[in-house]
Structures are given as structure tokens and as C-alpha cells.
Image (cartoon, helix red, strand yellow):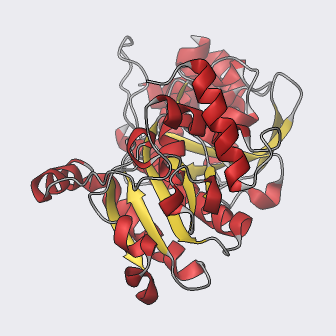
Amino acid sequence: MPNLTSVEKEFSNLTKKRGFLSSLIDKDIADSWKRCISTGLDPLKKPKRTILSSKELDELKEKNEYIRRLINPELELLYSQIAGTNFMVAYSDSTGSVMDTIYDKTCLKTDVGKIVIPGSIWREEIGGTNGLGQVVTLNKDSIVSGKEHFFESHGKLSCFASPILNHEGKTIGIIDASTDVHSREQHTLALVKLATKSIETKLFINQFKDELILSFHPRQEYLSTNSVGLLAINGDGFVVGSNSNARIMLHGLAPLKNENFNNIFTTSFSSIANELLQNKILKISDHLGSSVFIIKSQNFKKKISKETGIKTYACNNCKGSKFKEERCVLIKSAFIETGNISAASRKLGVSRTTIYKHLK
């Protein structure tokens, strides 16, 4: 394995040969090249192709069947959105092992169509510097264009990759678009990122389908887009899940997981619950002073607390109506939060008799 001095020397020679200035080359690309050199990869040689066996690929697909059902429609949509020829879109797992691909007609005869195939592995230590490999290593969006690839044989490719993140911020898959170096780079990456955000939203809603899911954004007109923050709230008013947008927009506040809604926003959960259930768009502020618009995006009928003697499902009088069932659960939540019928009545703006009816 090359020592530090020889790595820097080889890196300097490689940048000169490729026509890059060492001081101006993208830091992520430079760091990747140095890692490739350190592991003994030779940019002038063809990379050793590592392909999963048919059995291994089938097992990988079966393991990821659930997410593949959500991803494949997004791949088809992404494919239809990318203009030009000689391109393909692919889905890989979090390790850079490709499972599903869709090719342009002319792509199968090109370098892209020949090497980015189901079963191919694109981790950096195998495929050198490349889009999928960068996402595996860095856990963020990546463009690797033309001569930025470590292996010279990949110099005609451009790769645009974006991670699919779950509600804990963990990469669970990668979407990639690969084409020739003349593609519109930022435009293509933007489309790939839209695809991953759409997948993340579907995964989040499925994951927390039994909870109240709230969408929020600083701009009201963005509430119907995939740029919204998503919070899954249980019957006690605690956050049980958040998407990556929510974590970005609420950065600097208390950790979101298992945090009380009231510790994040200055408006209490119980005071706006009824309005949210009526699909009203509300404007609230977080404890750092930022304002957002918030609206309900999913129904919920979940247990409130295992530690109370109160039934945590809707009472018989409320069954048969989704809104009444949800409202019944929220009333019980308000009572648990306050521990007092009068206090719960004041928070929700309903009569004490109404509170008692739902707790009976």
C-alpha cells in the first residue's frame, strides 16, 4: 500500500494528466482519488468487474422487495423525465449493488449499458471514484463527471446519484442516472433528487400510517410538494418519526425522536388538534422563532398510553366516522397531558361533558 508521500505525489500526477488544478479540484473527488490510490487501484487499468451471481442477485432483490415496489414506478418516471440519449437509471442498495435498471435504446451498446447492470457493484474500492460509490461513502448527493472518475476507462461517463434516507436518516438505497459527459448535470441531479424525495415520502407514510402525520414548510404553497417536513405524532403528542426535511428545518431544537410536540413548537399540540383534524392550514412558530405552515397529511388511530386505565381506541359513540374516532383519541390525549377534565376542556375548547363522554 502506498505511503502518504507517494499518495500525494501520485495524486498530483493524476490531476495534471487529467488537466485539473490540484487546488481547484472538488474536495470530495480529490479525497476519493487519494483513497483509491491508497488502496492500490491503478487508474490506467480497467477496473476489476465484480458481479453478483444470479442467486445472490435474486436474494438481494427478495430482501429489498418492499422498497423495490415503491422505487420501480419512480425509476420509470425518472427515465421519462431525463432528456437525451445514451442514458440509464438504476436503483442500488446502500452498499452500491445494483438491482434494477432502465436503459435508453441506444444505451445498451455504450459503456454505460455494458457496465452498469443488475448485479454490478460500485463501491469505491471496486469501481473507483463514481456516483454510486460516492453516495455509499459520503451519504449525500453526488455528481461524478467524465475525467473525475478515477478509472480512465470511465472517462466518458457522467453519474448522478442520490441516497434514499429512512426516518432515522440512514441510507437504505441509492438512485443513479448515468449517461454521457455532455448531459445537463445540475438538471439531471435535480431530477434524481426529486425521485429519492418522493420515495422517502412514500416510505415515511407507509411506516407511520397508524400515526398522525403532519406536513410543514415555511412557505404555504410548498405544502403539497416533496420538500415538506414530515412529523409522525402519536396520541400522546410525541414525535415518533421525522423525515430528512424536518430534521433540516428544525435543526438546533431538541432532538426530534420521542420529543414532545410542545417542546418543539410554541403552540401546544392539544390546542390545535381539532383544527388539524379539520384539515386547516395553521401557522405556528418553533422555539427558535421560525414560523411554518402546518397541516395534517395522514389519519391516525393509535394507542395513547400503555400506562393508563383509559381505553386508547375510539369509544363506541365515535366509531364509524374517521374524524370522530380521531377526535376521540385526541380528547383522551389532552386529558392524559393535563390530568384534569377541566384543563383538557379549556385546551380543546370543548365542554367538560364532552370530555367525560369520551373517557367514560
Observer-nearest of 249 and 6: 6
Residue at the image position 48 percent from the left and 51 percent from the top: 132
Kindly tell me whether residue 325 is visible in this rendering: yes
Residue reaching furthest to the bottom = 105
Residue at the image position 38 percent from the left and 44 percent from the top: 126
On the rendered structure, is 106 left or right of 294?
left
Q: Would you place residue 247 above or below residue 259 in this image?
A: below
Give x and y (percent) for residue 63: 21, 47
On the rendered structure, is 294 left or right of 181?
right
Q: Would you place residue 113 above or below residue 46 in this image?
A: below
Give x and y (percent) for residue 212: 52, 41
Observer-nearest of 235 and 242: 242
Q: Would you place residue 66 above or below residue 247 in this image?
A: below
On the rendered structure, is 252 left or right of 157?
right
Kindly tell me whether residue 31 is visible in this rendering: no
Give x and y (percent) for residue 199: 49, 56
Q: Would you place residue 226 above or below residue 76 in this image?
A: above
Q: Is the N terminus in the top left, top right, bottom left or bottom right quadrant? A: top left
Q: Is the C terminus in the top left, top right, bottom left or bottom right quadrant? A: top left
Observer-nearest of 129 and 281: 129
Observer-nearest of 173 and 306: 173
Residue at the image position 65 percent from the left and 25 percent from the top: 261
Q: How many marks?
A: 0
Give x and y (percent) for residue 78: 53, 72
Tell me the quarter of the picture where residue 100 sits: bottom left
Tell me the quarter of the picture where residue 312 sits: top left
Residue at the image position 40 percent from the left and 59 percent from the top: 91
